Image (tube, helix red, strand yellow):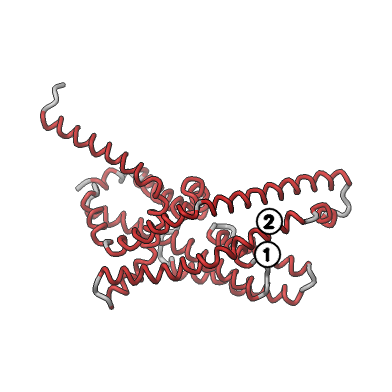
Amino acid sequence: MDLGEKDVRRISTLTLVLVLGILAFFVVQPLLIAVLSALILAYIFSPVYNKVLKYIPNKNAAATLVSVVILVVLFVPLWFMTPMILQQVYDIAGYYQKLDVGAVVQNMFPTSSEKFITQTTLTMNNLVNTLTSSISKYLIDFLLNIPFLLIDLLIVAFVFYYSLRDADKLGAFARSISPLSEANEQVLVKHFKDMTDTIIYGQFIVGIVQGLLAGIGFALFGVNNALVLTLLAIFFSVIPFIGPWVVWGPVNVYLFATGKPGLALGYLAYNVLIVSVVDNILRSYLISRKTNISPALVMVGMIGGIYLFNMIGILIGPLILAYFFTLLKTFKDKSFYSLFSK
């Protein structure tokens, strides 16, 4: 089959676009996590930007103000708390290294045979050594990567600012290159937005608030290493089916075991009446009338996303799966191809 001049031009253009697209991906790939983090932050705080824009009708000034405030609120405290967090992690690792595991096993299983206690003690010692070694390695890697983290933070700040300021232009550009018909595009975009709100606000933001409330409890009741425990509480609060009780539950048992029943009861009441209840209140308020997404899908997406995108994958993974299954459903309902009909 002979190719005409138009066919050659079309193939050449598509080849050029494909090559440039691949090269662009490799250029952005080292900074992909920082860029995605900035885009997610811009999505979360876009309502704040829109409200500020009503009072300051200048996009540059409004975006600058929001960016500075978010930087101060989110990153400045983290900058000052990081040395304290590292110190607490070292303290925890040192505590477990000095822990008499044999005595703990003996107290837990007082009627067990000596062979069982010896084998269990050896296994727990290996587990503790592996855990402390992993913590030390992670901390060393973190300190060595501080220059790269600062670069990532700079990228996050720039992309966040321009994503807020130029949101209208980005949306118009996305619509201009979309192959979907206008009516189908509006329906699909609304559905995607509902799913995004459900995951970001209903799962992620609520989890952060719940974890922070658990952290306030650690501080109020004088629990040691409260910062590290707060980070763990936030992490487990974000994950479906789990929650911050994984952290505050053992702490409560520890308070009872160390002869502080009054403090333990007060701490238990705080977590049951405040930390646990706020989950249902905030979730129903933030995601009312939104799309229902299976918690199993969210959990699988979070775990897989962490493997693929590190910690930011907690958000990106569930979103990818939710979008994919939405498109898969349209294919199942035989409405997939109609999305592209003009």
User: What residue sits 27% from the left and 36% below the top?
Assistant: 19
C-alpha separation, residue under disc 1 versus residue under disc 2: 20 Å
Residue 310 shows in the view: yes
Q: Considering depth in this image, is 183 or 69 the residue closer to the camera?
A: 69
Label 1 crowd (10 A; few <14 / some 14-19 / many >=20): few
Amino acid at circle 1: Gly
Residue 99, percent across and down?
Answer: 77, 56
> Which residue corresponds to mark 1?
249
33 on left or right of 263 = left
Above or below, comparing residue 201 to residue 316 in the picture: below
Which quarter of the figure has residue 212? bottom right
Amino acid at circle 2: Ala
36 on left or right of 220 = left
10 on left or right of 280 = left
> Which residue corresponds to mark 2?
93
Element on which disc 2 rests: helix
User: What residue sits 52% from the left and 68% below the top?
Assistant: 209
